[in-house]
Image (cartoon, rainbow, N blue to C red):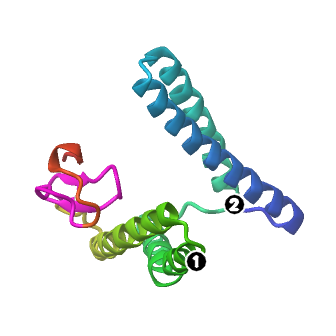
Amino acid sequence: MTIKKQMTKTFVENAFTGESKAHMRYMLFAERAEEDGLPNIARLFRAIAYAELVHARNHFRSLGGLNDTPQNLQHAADGETFEVEEMYAVYQHAAKFQEEPQAETFAHYALEAEKIHAEFYNQANHYAQQGTDMNLKTLYVCPVCGYTVEGTAPDNCPVCGAPRKRFTAFEP
């Protein structure tokens, strides 16, 4: 069931956005607490981040945001494509114009990674529409820029230069 009244829909969309941001913010805080040698505080951040994920999931469901996998993959691919074709190109340009080198670099990193993500989603959607799963090898993600590759991590990230040992593996 999806929400029918516009005002309630707007409120729930705002709640979804807030809970989503809180989830991510707390996960980042947890990483920092780990780096600071505070594992229990990190665990607290992760636990509450999970609670925020539960809230966001509930709001997303009430908005009718969860569909079958092919529709979800198409939505994801469309989002990544928008980020590549419109959003990050403009963000990067604005950051350069306003002489914000860190913002420019991070927009560039995201732009390059999103191109790959869109392709992965499009490939996955091809399989999902046939009712089959993808045959994926280990996925490696660069923790600096988000570059994603299947199979083997490169010696150095082609986007940001991070060494292979820093990549995070997502194994089958």
Specify whether 144 is left or right of 163: right
Q: Position of residue 95 (x, y in %)?
A: 55, 72
Is any part of residue 53 visible from this angle? Answer: no
* Mark 2, residue position: 63
In the image, taking residue 115 as reference, residue 86 lies left or right, namely right
Q: For the residue carrying disc 2, how many other residues have a C-alpha within 10 Å: few (<14), some (14-19), or many (20+)?
A: some
The span from disc 2 to disc 1 (Cα, nearest Å) is 33 Å
Q: How many marks?
A: 2
Q: Does residue 81 lie above or below 48 as drawn?
A: below
Q: Is residue 150 located in the magenta-colored stretch of the structure?
A: yes
Q: Residue at horizontal 64%, vertical 42%?
A: 22
Upstream in the sequence, badge 2 or badge 1?
2
In magenta segment, residue 48: no
Residue 135 at what x, y percent from top left? 16, 61
Q: Quadrant of residue 168?
A: top left
The range drawn in magenta is 136-158
In the displayed structure, does residue 106 sit left or right of residue 11?
left
Residue drawn 18% across and 60% down?
A: 150
Secondary structure mostly seen in the magenta stretch:
loop
The residue identified by callout 1 is 94
Q: Residue 129, how many percent across, how many down? A: 34, 75
Q: Nearer the viewer, mark 2 or mark 1?
A: 1
User: Which quarter of the image is occupied by the N terminus?
Assistant: bottom right
